[in-house]
Image (cartoon, rainbow, N blue to C red):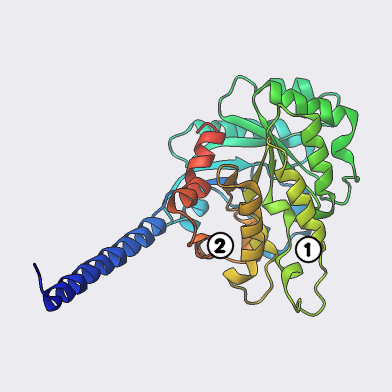
Amino acid sequence: MPNRRTFLLNSAATLATAAACSTAADLSAKESAKNLPLVDTHQHLWDLKLFQPPWLAGAPDVLSKSYVTKDYLQATKGLHLAKAVYMEVDVAVKDQVREARHVIALSKSDDHPTAGAVISGRPNSPDFAAYIKQFAKSPQFKGVRQVLHVPDAKRGLCLEKQFVQSVRLLGELARSFDLCMRPTELKDGAKLADLCKDTRLIVDHCGNADPKSFMKKPPAGAELWHQVDEWKRGIHALAERPNVICKISGIVARAPQPKWSSEHLAPIINFCLDEFGPDRVVFGGDWPVCLLGGEYAQWVRALKEVIAERKLVDQKKLLHDNAVRLYRL
């Protein structure tokens, strides 16, 4: 039988070994998290030689130039990008077909990380069905978006009869609709989800949340887009609908300048992740629009800092696995 001294020595050795194993496991988990692959579900590209989105006429200088695949690859260098899903760039209606054909062709090419496309559309148009059905046989066509927070998009537009019929049609075609709307109208998105139960709705940019709204002292002169409680109620309502998922994207563009950190983004990210759960969230880069707030790599680093304490399997779902499954990549 071991004496007390031997017992204590053995216990100390066991504890030291356990501590070393725990430290090694922690380091291994951190290293694994650092190297997780990315699927970017919100990749913008625009080649001004092909088409010029009207809104660029009044955009900041950083956006007023072409952004093509080679620029995207440079922006994502070293970030373990696996694939990307193109997101329409609000081109003029006359350019919608040309944009759609261009990005579907891009998605078929092995020379680009783009593997699918969410194309532009106007669901409230009686011509929507004819327009969208011409792409229905293309597996690279993943869904449709119309930006609903621009000045000429009236409140309640997504609940009008023709709009609802068109979104239902997308569900019949096994395609999604992206909700990019004012944070003060998120409950309209929840109503749309109830009216279109067989269509997957994707909430862009965490419901267009503004990080400045969450600051105790917002920057002087900052125009806040919403109240925190109002946004939370909207996100909660959307998360209660099982056919809605949330894209963790876009919030960097509204981050407080000239300096922000992951702490400014954490309240928004964590609330969305907790409301929607690990299986109904995807990552979006929102490049090059994210350049209004920071570089692509800066956004990815900040996001990984916020989610670092979450289970590694859930981090991987957010950054990669859910997108592969939900977009059928």
* Percent of width and height locating residue 242: 68, 36
Looking at the rendered structure, the secondary structure element under dot 2 is: helix
- Judged from this view, the residue extending furthest toward the front is 1
| Disc 1 to disc 2: CB gap under 8 Å | no
Looking at the rendered structure, the secondary structure element under dot 1 is: helix
Label 2: which residue?
299
Give the image quarter of residue 5.
Answer: bottom left
Q: Nearer the viewer, residue 326 or 82?
A: 326
Depth-wise, is mark 1 or mark 2 nearer the camera?
A: 1
Instruction: Residue type at mark 1: give it.
Output: Val
- Judged from this view, the residue extending furthest toward the left is 1
Give left or right: position of 250 versus 93.
left
Q: Residue at x 56, y 42 (%)?
A: 279
Q: Badge 2: how crowded within 10 Å, few (<14), some, or many (20+)? A: many
Instruction: Residue type at mark 2: give it.
Output: Trp
Which quarter of the rendering shows the N terminus? bottom left
Give left or right: position of 164 versus 76.
right
Q: Residue at x 60, y 19 (%)?
A: 137
* Percent of width and height locating residue 211: 70, 66
Give the image quarter of residue 176.
Answer: top right
Give left or right: position of 218 versus 327.
right
* Percent of width and height locating residue 106: 53, 35
Label 1: which residue?
228
Q: Visible in this render: residue 94?
A: yes
Of pointers 1 and 2, the one earlier in the residue sequence:
1
Q: Badge 1: how crowded within 10 Å, few (<14), some, or many (20+)? A: some
Tell me how far mark 1 sits from mark 2, CA to CA: 22 Å
